[in-house]
Image (cartoon, coloured by chain):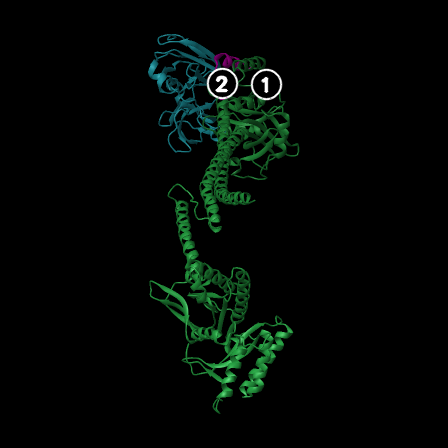
Amino acid sequence: MLAAGLMLQTISVHAGYLSLQALDAETGLPLADVVMEVELPENLHAQFLSPAEREVDQQDKEFVARATLITRNSQVRFPNSDNILHHVYSFSAAKVFELPLYGSGRNIDYLEKFEVAGVVELGCNIHDWMLGYIYVAETDFAVVTGADGKGMINNIPAGSYRVKLWHPRALPGDPALEQEVSVSDGELTQLRIALSLSRDHRLRRAPGPSRSRYR
Amino acid sequence: MKNFQHKLGFQSFRSRLLVFLLALLVPVLSGIFVFVNDENNDYTEETINSYLDLGADVFDFSREEHKNTLLTITSTLTRDWGFRNAFGTGDPYTIIDAIDNLLMRSLGAADMMMITQMDGTVIIDTATQGFETLQGEWRTLMDAAAASSEGIAAAVITVADIPYQMTVIPLYLPTPVAWIFGGFPLDDQFAETVKQSIVSDVSILRISKGVVPREVVASTLSAVDQSMLMNQLQLPAGIDSSFGDTTQRIGMSDGDYGTLVRQLVGQPGDELQIMAVIQKSYRENEQNLLELQRRLLQFYLLVIALSLGVVVLLARSVSDPVLKLVQRVKLIEQGDYDQVVQVRGRDEIANLASSVNNMARGLAEKEKVRDLLGKVVSPEIAEELLSKNIELGGEEKIITILFADIKGFTTLCETRQPAEVLTLLNTYLSRITQAIEDHHGVVDKFTGDSVMALFGAPISRTKDADNAMHTALAVQEAMTRLNQINRDLGLTGIEAGIGVHTGLVVAGNLGSSKRLNYTVIGDAVNLAARLEGLTRIYHVANIVSESSRDAAPSFIYREIDKVRVKGKNETVRIFELMGAEGDLSEAELADIELFNQAIGLHRQRHWQAALALFEELNLRLCGSADYAESIYGVYIARIGQYQGTPPASDWDAVFTFFSK
């Protein structure tokens, strides 16, 4: 969003707006953690790429936030707010890395750079249920929905685009995940999309005693 | 022989008691035996069934535990960082080594593993089955896991011809990226392991329709028993919900086995079926049952033996006194009343013995009375008196009465000592009495030197009159014999006078209620006595009335006279009994004929002619013309009177006596 704000000043004359309202197709409720990315022609990628530094925290043995949106070449910090050790890893194609066991206050200054666009699934080798996502977008024209299921991309050069949608539990091949939109100069294009979700294959948290004993 | 019969009787009584006891005991004991047997059979069935149910449940549990162990192992091992790293490399050789490592780490709990992509594309298969994507039951298993909330599923799948218990679990990196299949074989070792916990034999059976109808793929049984099981096991053709609970009894090489089937793969009728067969031998329970039966039979034998012993003792306690009583009664029957039978106790037999003793005493007394009575009265009267209630009063009946009197006895008395006279008299009377009793007569009484005898009382016979005639003849003969003997002693002139009459009398007990006689009374008695008295007048041995002669027609008589005795108006024809038919000689018969002619002439008043005949008869009798003391002399004298004083014209030839 910050990056989008910067771009707004430069190309505001020939730009439009794209908003998303994501819903759970089953319940009709707003759906968070939906990433919408506008596919730009490759020659424009460099022009609209604003790498940044981000942070994925680990609190109460969960990744916060669950789904984090970054642009390519951004760097991410993985602090540990818990008083136990974590072992962050990813075997995803977009980024294979691991941060072997480290405790609170460690790795605060360490930044992992994500150079390939794609979805990076974060796990913890100590806590199998911990699952986080880093969506590495190609350009700045991407947004992730909040709890209200809403997201907005500003200053998109007017034109017709393919828009990709992603959600951790979205069904592969769901046609709703690819949309064609036209962005007109100074206009707001609204997308309202209901996604069918797959079963949540997350592992369950370990039961209480271990938590109460070591927290 | 008698002893033997006694023993036989005793045996028979004992036998009856024994038969009764056995008839009572055997059905009861048999009933108990059958009941206990049935109950035990039921119990055995129940025990085997519960063993099998338990065994099947433990089998299921055991398989479930194995499954869970497998899942635990695969789940734990696949989350191993090293394995994750190895899988993360995407290098197949590294992954295979990592899996082999995993299998080793499972210490045999897992035997094979397979890793596929989430879409079923095979990445690694330790069993190298050769397919690239999951198919058939493998894909079914994967779909089942995908559909489950835990991402877990299990099934029995044949790998390299061996049924494997397979489980599947996702590999999380950290999201599910692959399916990890793990399995262990349901082989002999597995069967053996389960057998250790359920103490029952376990076999794994497979049916592949069109390939192998029925095969045992794993078993704790011997090869022989395996084929026996395959041949005998009944399987339903279609789905049968009760089949899993139905115990089959299958004969194996060492006895019957209770058999329960658990379907592992497929349903009855499916193309492929794999089932676990759990079997428990009846042998142990049947041995227990046999032992119980043996003990029961021993107990029965003891009970029966004890009962028989008691019965024998009981029988002896009854039969011994009974035998004593029987012997006692036999002695009593033979007239020995003096033995006393001793039976101890207060039971019925003791009472009976006491009664027998009392009876013997009573009989002894009665016998004494009978003896005495027989001497005082005639045996028949004694019998009559003893056999009936003695009542006063009597009955009217026609009998024949015989009086026998010893003539000339009075003269004898004058010259002899009284004791001598009595002895002599008793001798004569004894003979007379003997003659009477020999011919069924009854001595009614002795009156001085005379005897009164009855024929037809108290007991009527068909030939009472004949018996009286025989008696008269016998008395006469006895007198003749006695006289012959006595003549040597210088005794002569003792003769018997006999009167016989047949007529109506009243017979019965006469006297008071305390003292009474059985006797007869009536005119007939008096007439018989009169007739006896007339023998002195007519000088004949006997006089028989016309009614007696008519009653005994088979004898030879001669008519002596027609008389009217004192106190009687009617005339009586009197006869002398001469003898039985055929006893008399020609000469005697001729004399009788001549006498009859003489009587006839006398009645027709042909005095002279009659006299001539009587004299002729007298001459034949005496051998001289002297008038002997005989019937002829009587008539010769009477004719002499009539010749001097002829009787009136209305003379009816009846001689009237005015004295007794």
Please state, as top left, top right, bottom left or bottom right, where the C terminus of chain A lies in the image: top left
Residue B488 in the image: state x and y as whole percent. 54, 60
Please give the range of residues in magenta.
B69-90
Is disc 2 placed on a helix, strand or loop? helix
Position of residue B115 relative to residue B629, above or below, is above
Check disc 1 and report the residue beneath it: B126
Q: Mark 2 points at which residue?
A: B73
B280 within the magenta span: no
Location of residue B278 (image quadrant):
top right
Q: Can residue B461 be seen in this view?
A: yes
The green chain is B
Tell me the subunit letter for badge 1. B
Q: Nearer the viewer, residue B308 or B122?
A: B308
Where does the image place residue B367, in percent across and percent down from the top left? 43, 54
Q: Residues within 10 Å of mark 1 (few under 14, many from 20)?
A: some
Task: Report whether B28 appears left or right of A82.
Answer: right
Apparent side of residue B387 relative to residue B196 in the rendered image (left or right): left
